[in-house]
């Protein structure tokens, strides 16, 4: 359905939401098994050619 709506030009906007967390001990699918959990602080961001975004984060140990 989504693909058909976009192909027909009926989609005005697509929103992407990021929640940057590194999960080790918790979460449904930990990417670093047996590691600590980390939160992330956004340090910098920039946009390249209006299509690509670079986000730079500092990992902080989750309390």
Image (spheres, rainbow, N blue to C red):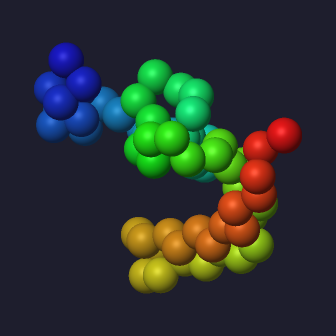
Residue at (24%, 25%) from the top-left corner?
A: 2
For the residue pair 1 and 55, the one nearer the viewer reads as 55
Q: Is residue 17 visible?
A: no
Query: On the image, which quarter does residue 42 sit in?
Result: bottom right
Q: Is residue 8 above or below residue 36?
A: above
Residue at (44%, 41%) from the top-left corner?
A: 33
Q: Is residue 31 left or right of residue 40?
A: left
The image shows residue 56 at horizontal and vertical percentages of 63, 72
The image shows residue 51 at horizontal and vertical percentages of 41, 69
Q: Is residue 26 above or below residue 9?
A: above
Q: Is residue 52 visible?
A: yes
Q: Is residue 24 left or right of residue 31?
A: right
Query: On the image, which quarter does residue 9 sit in?
Result: top left
Q: Residue furthest top?
A: 1
Residue at (84%, 40%) from the top-left corner?
A: 63
Q: Is residue 32 above or below residue 50?
A: above
Q: Quadrant of the N terminus?
A: top left
The image shows residue 46 at horizontal and vertical percentages of 61, 78
For the residue pair 52 and 25, the one nearer the viewer reads as 25
Number of labelled discs?
A: 0
Q: Is residue 43 above or below residue 37?
A: below
Q: Residue furthest right?
A: 63
For the residue pair 26 and 8, the one nearer the viewer reads as 26
């Amino acid at each position: 359905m989504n693909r058909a709506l976009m192909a027909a030009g009926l989609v005005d906007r697509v929103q992407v939401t990021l929640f940057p967390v590194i999960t080790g001990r918790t979460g449904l699918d930990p990417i670093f098994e047996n590691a600590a959990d980390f939160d992330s602080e956004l340090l910098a961001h920039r946009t390249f050619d209006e299509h690509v975004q670079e986000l730079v984060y500092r990992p902080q140990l989750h309390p």
